[in-house]
Amino acid sequence: MNKFYNYISSLFDSKKIRLIESDDNLDAAIGLLSKSSEIAVDTEFIWRKTYYPELSLIQIADKENIYIFDMYKKFNLENLKILFERKDVKKIFHSIRSDISVLKHCLNIQVNNVFDTQIAENIIESDDINQISYKALIKKYYLREISKKETNSDWSKRPLDQGQILYAANDVRFLINIMKIQSSIIEKKGLKEDLYKTIKKEKENGEERFFISRLRRLRKNQKNLSNLDEKIFIWRELQAEEKNLPPNNIVQNSFLPKLADVIRKGNFQECMWIIKNDESRESFLSEFK
């Protein structure tokens, strides 16, 4: 692997950045992307005041172009969905779970034939604990530092500024070539089966409903979780899902044990201050009283 050659070639990268804001441009872009055997994919989203993430951008790169789809536009997404579901086009991500989750839960898109450069690097380095960042991956294979100052950018802002557009484009610019380098290394090491088994599991985790993965994490972090604690946690998640609000907006985390105590002692009048929303309070009383 010639890192210096990768570095020099990256300086002359001629991919054009194309901002997609209309159905006509979307269909034209999908038509070109559909001719590729592999494409690089990333998403930008906001996840602060809602249960489901709010999708802002989808970035897709082929060998010649980087398309940035402004998801605040009211697109007809049928052709985009077909592209993601095609099994003969490989979709390359870095850290697949969040992007798969966003595409699944925001757009009801089932993504087929995927590759994850973060998982591939873990397999290559025999390290299943430390998750390499995209920035570190570029440094390793291209000897380049890329700016991540827009990581916490306001992706709801319109129009997007040039810094945001360049940041979003760079998140997919190098993925196809990195995938090819990693695939060659993994093939030589005989680790292909391990790679795709791990990717498949991570993809499935991303497709789960949020309350399932969050309950699994809760069980891992709290070893003595009771059945009642789990039922209250699931009830809150389903309320948050229904109202598209953060779970803390239904009941704060610190009050969950108090709710279990309310049920055990029958002190349901305490629900008046613990659960502020009237509909959620009525739901809780109906479920547990």
Image (tube, rainbow, N blue to C red):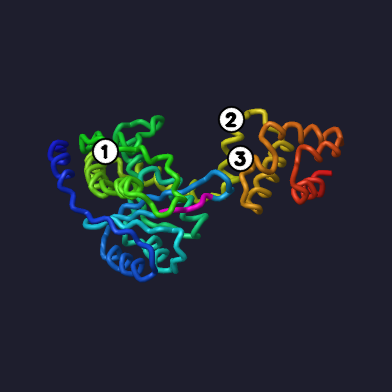
Residue placed under numbered mark 1 in the picture: 138
**Is residue 228 positioned above or below 74 on the image?**
above
Q: Earlier in the sequence, mark 1 or mark 3?
A: 1
Residue 239 percent coordinates (x, y)? 68, 49
Q: Is residue 174 above or below residue 136?
A: below
Callout 3 secondary element: helix
Residue wearing tag 2: 221
How much space separates mark 2 and mark 3, taking CA atoms?
10 Å
Residue 78 found in image quarter = bottom left
Residue type at mark 3 is Leu
Give the class, few, some or many, for how many residues have Cα within 10 Å of label 1's Cα (few <14, many ≥20): some
Q: Main secondary structure of the magenta part?
A: strand
> Is residue 38 or residue 157 the one in the foreground?
157
Which circle's residue, 2 or 1, is located before the other in the chain? Answer: 1
Q: Which residues are magenta?
A: 53-57
Q: Nearer the viewer, residue 153 or 144?
A: 153
Residue 31 locus on image (x, y percent): 30, 68
Q: CA distance from mark 2 to mark 1?
A: 33 Å
Task: Give the residue drawn at x 44%, y 48%.
Answer: 155
* Residue type (three-letter) at the residue carrying disc 1: Ile
Q: Quadrant of residue 186?
A: top left
